[in-house]
């Protein structure tokens, strides 16, 4: 009896499991397309894991969410890469980008309104990247980032374009966000040395999508997560004999220092979809990067698109067996996992100042604009934690399992004299739509 009632709970999941596309198309408007079952799987997860290509396309056409994780911590895209059908992976990547654009568009009016309400200001942020791996530490960048805000516009001047997989771009770069401009023209990157500018594209070309699919199909499936569940804050102490709470000036701001305990950066990899040749090639690239070669490998080889993998063996699990399995013990529906998990605990410090004129909420609104760049989205993720009272004027955060960043808010002032010309593209700059191909 219990089995029966359990199996009736998830009608969309059941249709997919049984390959019943006709019933799925009639129920898809009635039931919640984003509902998770006991394993945390949405209907899209199941359709991908079981290779139900028609169901995948039907679910995507009805707006099934792509950026959602099951109990095991994997998204439908991760499961699609494991299964290895190229068309399905391409469809999910395309939909994921579309849904991210739509979410940003929804948030944009509030973001612009909040920026308008904030006073205009100038702020300096210092980034220092450090690693416990000696060779890596030697080649890590540091940066002083200058941020001007006027009305609904923000300009960020930096020497560090982005930091990803041990690769970074240096130069004299400015990011300009104009909230008053239409969406497709609101974010621009200037290369001040070459006198070039590029509008950040919100829509990728088909070529971009297919290039990304090739990379996904030939790389580890990665899930890295900064776990903040067990975090505790304790006052940092100073002095050898007479211990007292640590208080120091950070720039012009009085700050109380706190020790952060319990930050865990968990990194999980799957590689059941990779060939021996893929593994050798990836290992060679990583060794090259660790030695400080930030260019990776090109080798001048002609680029050949990855073909779909042969599908995994058909699952012989029944719907009843699947739906009655205990949570977290999902029966194997696709390839046998080749899986590696590692976690590293970090001790960090944060300096909180009651004097800083900006609130954490205001900072988050500023970071939302700059968050296409991965090290800023990490900072945003950190600031979302429940911090001690005040504003975090100095922070240590893990960026990668081997790399931490120290961020210092070393200057801040509300200003009435910020030049509106700062937010314009200079007239002698030329447009180069491919100056920053990763943006």
Image: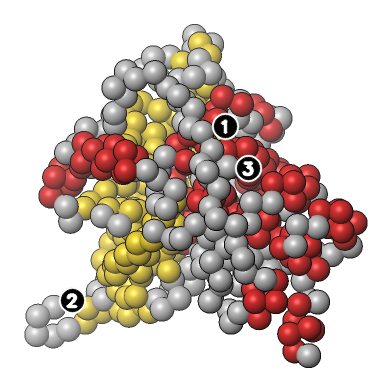
Dot 3 or dot 1, earlier in sequence: 3
Q: Residues within 10 Å of mark 1 (few under 14, many from 20)?
A: some
Q: Which mark is residue 209?
A: 1
Which residue bears the numbered disc 3? 88
Say if mark 3 contacts mark 1, CB within 8 Å: no
Residue 309's spot in the image, x, y percent? 51, 41
13 or 209, which lies in front?
Answer: 13
- Residue 391 horizontal side relative to residue 206, left or right: left
Quarter holding residue 227 = bottom left
Q: CA distance from mark 3 to mark 2?
A: 57 Å
**Among the two numbered marks 3 and 2 on one chain, the one whose residue lies closer to the N terminus:** 3
Element at label 3: helix
* Mark 2, residue position: 238
Along the viewing direction, whichever of 409 and 317 lies nearer the viewer: 317
Q: Are discs 1 and 2 less than 8 Å apart at CB?
A: no
Q: Which comes before the other along the chain, label 1 or label 2?
A: 1
Between marks 1 and 2 in the image, the one whose residue lies nearer the viewer: 1
Q: Secondary structure at mark 2?
A: strand
In screen coordinates, is 123 left or right of 19? Answer: left
Q: Is residue 179 visible?
A: yes
Q: Nearer the viewer, mark 3 or mark 2?
A: 3
Image quarter hosting the N terminus = bottom right
Q: Quadrant of residue 136?
A: top left
């Amino acid at each position: 009896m219990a089995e029966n009632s359990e199996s009736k709970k998830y009608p969309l999941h059941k249709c997919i499991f049984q390959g019943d596309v006709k019933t799925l198309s009639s129920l898809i408007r009635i039931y919640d397309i984003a509902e998770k079952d006991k394993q945390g799987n949405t209907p899209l997860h199941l359709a991908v894991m079981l290779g139900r290509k028609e169901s995948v396309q039907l679910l995507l056409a009805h707006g099934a969410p792509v950026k959602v994780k099951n109990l095991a911590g994997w998204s439908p895209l991760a499961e699609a890469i494991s299964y290895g059908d190229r068309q399905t992976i391409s469809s999910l990547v395309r939909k994921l980008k579309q849904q991210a654009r739509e979410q940003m568009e929804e948030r944009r009016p509030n973001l612009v309104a909040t920026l308008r309400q904030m006073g205009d200001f100038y702020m300096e942020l210092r980034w220092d990247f450090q690693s416990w791996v000696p060779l890596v530490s030697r080649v890590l960048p540091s940066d002083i980032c200058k941020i001007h805000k006027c009305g609904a516009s923000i300009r960020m001047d930096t020497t560090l374009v982005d930091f990803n997989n041990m690769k970074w771009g240096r130069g004299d770069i400015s990011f300009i966000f104009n909230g008053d401009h239409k969406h497709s023209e609101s974010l621009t990157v200037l290369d001040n040395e070459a006198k070039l500018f590029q509008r950040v594209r919100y829509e990728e070309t088909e070529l971009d999508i297919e290039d990304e699919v090739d990379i996904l199909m030939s790389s580890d499936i990665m899930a890295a997560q900064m776990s903040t569940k067990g975090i505790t804050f304790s006052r940092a102490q100073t002095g050898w004999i007479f211990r007292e709470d640590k208080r120091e000036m950070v720039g012009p701001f009085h700050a109380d220092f706190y020790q952060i305990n319990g930050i865990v950066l968990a990194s999980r990899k799957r590689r059941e979809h990779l060939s021996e040749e893929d593994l050798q090639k990836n290992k060679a690239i990583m060794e090259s990067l660790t030695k400080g070669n930030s260019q990776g490998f090109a080798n001048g080889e002609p680029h050949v698109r990855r073909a779909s993998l042969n599908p995994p063996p058909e699952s012989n699990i029944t719907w009843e067996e699947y739906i009655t399995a205990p949570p977290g013990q999902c029966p194997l529906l696709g390839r046998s996992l080749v899986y590696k998990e590692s976690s590293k605990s970090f001790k960090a410090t944060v300096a909180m100042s009651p004097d800083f004129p900006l609130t954490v909420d205001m900072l988050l609104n500023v970071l939302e604009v700059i968050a296409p760049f991965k090290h800023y989205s990490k900072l945003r993720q950190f600031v979302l934690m429940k911090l001690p009272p005040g504003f975090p004027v100095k922070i240590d955060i893990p960026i990668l399992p081997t790399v931490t960043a120290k961020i210092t808010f070393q200057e801040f002032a509300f200003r009435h004299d910020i030049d509106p010309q700062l937010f314009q593209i200079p007239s002698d700059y030329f447009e180069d739509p491919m100056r920053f191909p990763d943006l």
